[in-house]
Image (cartoon, helix red, strand yellow):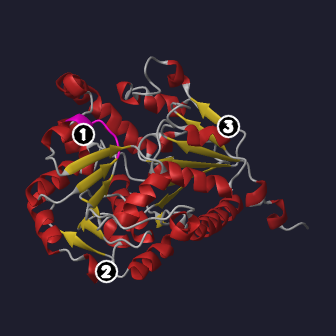
Amino acid sequence: MMSDDLNHRSLEKARVALVYDRVNKWGGAERIILALKKIFPQASLYTAVYNPVSASWAKSFRVVSSFLQGFPLARINHEFYPWLTPLAFESFDFSDFDIVISLTSAEAKGVITKPETLHLCYCLTPTRYLWSGRNDYFRFPGFGSLDSLARGFLRLIFPYLLRWDQVASQRPDYYLTISKNVKKRITKYYHRESKVIYPAIDIKKFQISNFKFQIKASPEKFFLVVSRLVPYKKVDLAIRAFNRLKLPLKIIGVGSQLKNLKKIAAANIEFLGKLTDKELIRYYYTCQAAICPQEEDFGLVPLEAQACGKPVISFKGGGALETVIAGKTGDFFYPQTSEALLKVVKAFESNRYDPDVCRKNAERFDQKIFIKKFKRKVETIWQAFQRKN
């Protein structure tokens, strides 16, 4: 009699689909998707909307977008259609796949799969605007002059979105997540168990020896913020602290709050916009420290700074508690106020931190380690799922 194991499909032969909320930007989650592609090179990428101009990183994928793709402004401003996005993900057909992996901080976990298809969710966080970031979202919906109108509309559809999210959270067969911080949220809001597999950075990318150009020390002793300029990132907190400190602060990133942040920034604060990776790494290597005022789900910026041998000054909360070693690779401030940050920056002395210690700490989160752990975990889950079904 043939062993049941011989009838099981190996992970290498499994038909895999990746699902992501929306493919229209570049950031930490998008780096994770590219790492997943190294594990599943033939995987298609399903999403609500796809903008090939702002998401050129996805050109190596076969991208399948939903019916929202044809709606006015959807590829740029998906926020206009919050009540339709759940339906967009429910409309996909995954009958041809053995494994569906949803990478999500919103609706992608809500895809519907058949019982014989494994749905594994790599959860970035339970839907932020419905749960942990609800208050910030209602204060700053992100529609500019239409914010007051947007708030009224959101209050009308909020109960529907909340109910749908609770139902959708039960659809994945298994949860993986990016940090202990998010693991707690998944338990609290979704009442599901999850396993932590930390995201990663490509350590080699941040080795100074890899660059043909020479990175010289900056004559200006500046601090650095690298962030999307949206409300929950709390960049305004750093600006208010450095307005008082009068120390040079450079801010790399773009987002809906750019105009407002520029209005409150003093002359010692410079906005650099969106930079290439090489330009970004130059600033990491020449700054005094990276400033992280927000509570991150995990946060790649602290790792990138440490990979360049630089310490981090972060709010004492969220993913930074899992990646920054107080007194050795950075320091924390608490509570989350400009006054608390100001005190830590005033006491900061860059020569207290060993660049080699910072980099060694970052090496624990190398992409090679992530790929190995993620692949091994999916293999284990996949084989157990097949035996059960």
| Mark 2 residue crowding within 10 angstroms, few (<14) / some (14–19) / many (20+) | some
Name the amino acid type tagged 3: Arg
Q: Residue at x 52, y 19 (%)?
A: 70
In the rendered image, the vertical position of residue 51 relative to residue 43, given as above or below:
above
Q: Is residue 255 magenta?
A: yes
- Is 14 covered by the magenta stretch? no
Q: Sequence order check: which comes first, mark 2 or mark 1?
A: 1
Above or below 79: residue 206: below
Identify the main secondary structure in magenta: loop
Which mark, by number, is residue 315? none
- Say which of marks 3 and 1 sits in front: 3
Task: Give the position of the C terminus as an image quadrant.
Answer: bottom right
Q: CA distance from mark 3 to mark 2?
A: 45 Å
- What residue does disc 3 label? 62
The residue carrying mark 2 is: 353
User: Residue at label 1?
Assistant: 137
Q: Between residue 125 and residue 314, name the one nearer to us.
A: 314
Residue at screen point 52% across, 53% down: 31
Residue 194, position in %: x, y? 46, 63
Image quadrant occupied by the N terminus: bottom right
The x and y percentages for residue 11 are 73, 59
Q: Nearer the viewer, residue 64 or 269?
A: 269
Residue type indicated by callout 2: Tyr
Classify mark 3: helix, strand or loop: loop
Task: Say which quarter of the image contains residue 362.
Answer: bottom left
Q: Secondary structure at mark 1?
A: helix
Contact? badges 3 and 2 (CB < 8 Å): no
First to last magenta residue range: 253-259
